[in-house]
Image (cartoon, helix red, strand yellow):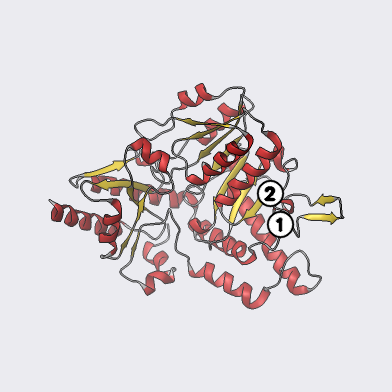
């Protein structure tokens, strides 16, 4: 990786808050000046609506927007840019699949398979569809170590299973799931797979062509890009057969009083004016990450995770959740300090300029499985250092001593 101090200097927020220890990257990441500048440049020099204008400014904006799509496709190893659908976030990307896939393919009695470690974004939309279409939701168990129980997965797959939706990396446990293996198991039985990659794409190399999943969703704001931009990858098997999610301008070829002809993908799934500047910001974020390299980012986060796990192990009354092996984790560690609610802990840490997340992290079924109401969560990214972890752990020790 580039010099860590140099990386931190690329982020204006740390110049404005030099004492900030930011460890809430699983919620959103900070933005480098390169991304901020790309958005500013667009507004100052190329701002126009896309796909419609027959004038130079609109054509420049269109070229920039579509260049971002090409960059995303290459970043995740998609075969074609047409397979990349821009949404407002990973949540909307998953909802697009739920709405379009369920409406076309599912009927009463069909089953959707999820896991107990899913984010609410990959649970609630399926529950809504299940209620509407009288589907059945089943959950694959996880092991005491926080990993998917592959045997339970196999036992729950049957002729009624119409899709398996799974997170690539847990936003609570940090668990990196064996998506390629899971997809092979499901595809051998003719079952499509949707992957929530919100906690994966920012943190380690993702190659869709190798994973062979049918749908893959992620958010831009968790990988240095602005909010308001997400991505859905759709395999060619489903790209041209799924109906559109939203109706409106730009997703149609023609409209009559009683007839509609839709655009080809990806525009079929992008009704209305899209988040143009956010897509341009996402392209700039990908350029920034590529300059560091995703393998280097993964190595850095694994080193931080291993270091943090070792430090936490030495603190009395700290309980850590998820795999013990750092190699099986993304840079996320959820924990609790006995005798202190996670919300109170986050407030005490905030007094020392340390930002973590506290609560159920939009994963209530998982917390119910863990038999805890909430947890504290630290999560790392490219600008974090071992010094950040030292400051956090030193503060945790002080808090622990004060409550004894």
Q: Callout 2 environment at 10 Å: few (<14), some (14 to 19), or many (20+)?
A: some
Q: What numbered label is drawn on residue 76?
A: none
Q: Name the foreground residue: 180 vs 219.
A: 219
Q: What numbered label is drawn on residue 271?
A: 1
Quadrant of the image occupied by residue 387: bottom left
Callout count: 2
Q: Do the residues labelled 1 and 2 touch (CB within 8 Å)?
A: yes
x%, y% of residue 193?
59, 35
Q: Is residue 21 left or right of residue 337?
A: right
Q: In this view, does 287 lie above or below 75?
A: below
Distance between the Cα atoms at labels 1 and 2?
8 Å
Q: Mark 2 points at which residue?
A: 245
Q: In this view, does 343 lie above or below 236?
A: below
Q: Residue at x 39, y 66 (%)?
A: 8
Q: Name the foreground residue: 215 vs 71.
A: 215
Q: Is mark 2 on a helix, strand or loop?
A: loop
Quadrant of the image occupied by residue 18: bottom left
Can I make out residue 175 in this image?
no
């Amino acid at each position: 990786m580039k010099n860590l101090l140099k990386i931190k200097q690329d982020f204006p927020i740390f110049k404005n808050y030099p004492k900030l220890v930011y460890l809430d990257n699983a919620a959103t990441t900070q933005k480098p000046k390169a991304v901020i500048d790309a958005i500013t440049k667009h507004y100052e020099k190329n701002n126009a609506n896309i796909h419609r204008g027959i004038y130079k400014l609109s054509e420049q904006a269109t070229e920039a927007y579509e260049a971002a799509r090409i960059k995303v496709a290459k970043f995740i190893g998609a075969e074609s840019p047409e397979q990349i659908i821009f949404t407002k976030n990973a949540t909307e990307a998953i909802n697009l699949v739920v709405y379009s896939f369920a409406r076309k393919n599912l009927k009463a009695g069909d089953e959707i398979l999820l896991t107990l470690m899913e984010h609410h974004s990959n649970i609630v939309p399926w529950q809504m569809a299940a209620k509407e279409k009288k589907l059945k939701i089943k959950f694959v168990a996880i092991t005491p170590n926080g990993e998917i129980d592959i045997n339970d997965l196999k036992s729950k797959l049957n002729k009624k299973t119409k899709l398996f939706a799974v997170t690539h990396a847990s936003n609570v446990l940090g668990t990196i799931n064996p998506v390629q293996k899971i997809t092979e198991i499901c595809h051998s039985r003719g079952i499509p797979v949707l992957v929530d990659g919100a906690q994966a794409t920012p943190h380690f190399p993702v190659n869709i062509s190798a994973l062979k999943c049918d749908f893959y969703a992620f958010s831009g704001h968790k990988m240095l890009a602005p909010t308001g931009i997400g991505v859905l990858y759709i395999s060619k098997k489903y790209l041209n057969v799924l109906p559109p999610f939203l109706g409106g301008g730009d997703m149609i070829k023609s409209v009559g009083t009683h007839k509609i002809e839709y655009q080809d993908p990806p525009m079929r799934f992008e009704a209305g004016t899209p988040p143009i500047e956010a897509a341009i910001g996402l392209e700039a974020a990908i350029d920034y990450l590529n300059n560091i390299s995703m393998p280097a980012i993964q190595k850095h986060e694994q080193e931080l995770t291993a270091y943090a796990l070792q430090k936490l192990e030495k603190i009395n009354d700290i309980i850590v959740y998820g795999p013990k092996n750092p190699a099986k984790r993304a840079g996320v560690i959820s924990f609790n300090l006995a005798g202190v609610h996670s919300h109170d802990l986050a407030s005490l840490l905030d007094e020392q300029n340390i930002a973590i997340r506290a609560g159920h992290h939009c994963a209530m079924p998982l917390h119910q499985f863990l038999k805890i109401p909430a947890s504290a969560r630290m999560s790392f990214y490219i600008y974090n250092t071992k010094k950040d972890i030292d400051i956090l752990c030193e503060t945790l020790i002080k808090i622990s001593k004060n409550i004894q």
